[in-house]
Amino acid sequence: MFAAQEIVQDDKSEFYRELATQLGALLDGESDPTANAANTAALIFQMVPDLNWAGFYFLRPEGELVVGPFQGKPACVRIAIGSGVCGTAMEKGESIIVEDVHAFPGHIACDPASRSELVVPLIHRDRVFGVLDLDSPSPGRFDVLDRAGFEQLAAIYVAACKWEEHAG
């Protein structure tokens, strides 16, 4: 049985290295994308300070993002590609840090307590198929070290899953 281990947070880069190790151990031997998304969101929400939402949105054949496993308050269910931070990160295929969501044109406010956001695209075989979304109630919560850390966590999630077996 996996049990998350507390991580000393003095060095942000080391924090993310240790969190990546824990995520790898948590997902080891499991290839189901939904199960892995649920456990990834739970571990992030438990271990990363100052978050009020952590979870996934996945691209659907209709061409929109649909909420997946997450931790936090109930979320917006559908997001158009190019809309809000999640839809923009999906469209551009790159991570986006927003220091103040109220200053982001077209921000979609699912939780009015959210003040900053980091969205990381999920990429498999050069195709963006969803995003990992992190919200914080603190303005300016995320920086380039957070972006690099969450990009590594997203890559671990993607690598752990067997996408062809769960297509549909």
Image (cartoon, rainbow, N blue to C red):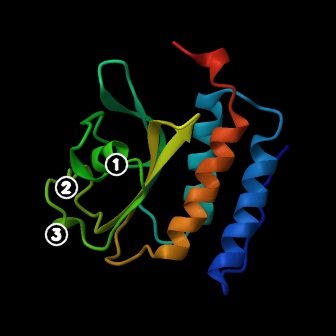
State yes or no: discs 1 and 3 in contact (Cβ < 8 Å).
Answer: no
Give the number of the disc on residue 107: 2
Q: CA distance from mark 1 to mark 3?
A: 19 Å
Residue identified by numbered label 3: 103
Q: Secondary structure at mark 2?
A: loop
- State which tag comes first along the sequence, 1 or 2: 1
- State which tag comes first along the sequence, 1 or 3: 1
Q: Amino acid at mark 3?
A: Ala
User: Residue, x 58% and y 38% (percent of image)?
Assistant: 37
Q: Amino acid at mark 2?
A: His
Instruction: Name the residue nearer the viewer: 64 or 4.
Output: 64
Residue identified by numbered label 1: 92
Tell us which disc is closer to us: 1 or 3: 1
Taking the view exactly as shown, the residue that stands out farthest to the front is: 126
State yes or no: discs 1 and 2 in contact (Cβ < 8 Å).
Answer: no
* Above or below 15: residue 111: above
Dot 1 alpha-carbon crowd within 10 angstroms: few under 14, some 14 to 19, many 20 or more: few
